[in-house]
Image (cartoon, rainbow, N blue to C red):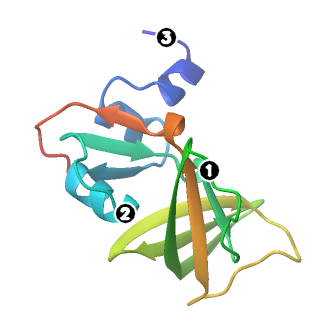
Amino acid sequence: MGSPMDLYLNPKTAFAASFMGHCNLLSHETFQQVIALENVKEGFYAIRPENIGINLKENIEYTQNNYYFKGVVKRIIPQGNTIRYTVVVNGNLIDVDTLFEVNNQLTRNDDVYLSIDKELIIYFNSSKKIS
């Protein structure tokens, strides 16, 4: 079975990924729209909200290890010491969690730049629909 940390970081199924904590669970079509690339493997992609970077300024130092995309803040949900931002990226909603910082808060309709380390994206090779 595995430790709780292993189940959280390396779930074997999309159900396990969503059961062990919140994640952005994306079909390959949606994932392709979000990262704006062609030829994405069929299946499902899980991205934990805390693994997505969010900034008001575009990152000038791009690396090959990350995907970068632009979005607009749609919703802001304070959750104690974290804030969940729901960001619209190419028509799709992506949740991003950040630590609460008094002087570093975003507002609705802010243009933002997101980044995700490719190694932190969990891929599921599945043809089953996920509800």
Considering only order in the chain, which callout, 1 or 3, is on the residue closer to the N terminus?
Answer: 3
Q: Nearer the viewer, residue 27 or 67?
A: 67
What's the distance in space between the residues labelled 3 and 1, CA to CA? 22 Å
Q: Amino acid at mark 3?
A: Gly
Q: Which residue is mark 3?
A: 2
Closer to us: mark 1 or mark 2?
Answer: 2
Q: Position of residue 91 (x, y in %)?
A: 32, 77
What's the distance in space between the residues labelled 2 and 3, CA to CA? 31 Å
Q: Nearer the viewer, residue 80 or 60?
A: 60
Q: What crowding class fits label 3: few (fewer than 14 Cα within 10 Å), some (14-19), or many (20 or more)?
A: few
Q: Residue at 32% across / 57% down in the picture?
A: 37
Closer to us: mark 2 or mark 3?
Answer: 2
Query: For numbered disc 1, what is the local secondary structure?
Result: helix
- Left or right: where does residue 26 sit relative to residue 97? left
Q: Residue at 11% across / 37% down in the picture?
A: 127
Q: Position of residue 103 (x, y in %)?
A: 88, 77
Q: Position of residue 70 (x, y in %)?
A: 51, 73
Q: Residue at 50% across / 40% down in the picture?
A: 118
Q: Position of residue 96 (x, y in %)?
A: 57, 61
Residue 50's mark?
Answer: 1
- Left or right: where does residue 84 sit relative to residue 2? right
Residue 127's mark?
Answer: none
Query: For numbered disc 3, what is the local secondary structure?
Result: loop
Q: Which residue is mark 2?
A: 34
Disc 2 to disc 3: CB gap under 8 Å: no
Q: What crowding class fits label 2: few (fewer than 14 Cα within 10 Å), some (14-19), or many (20 or more)?
A: many
Position of residue 30 relative to residue 58, above or below, is above
Q: Amino acid at mark 2?
A: Val
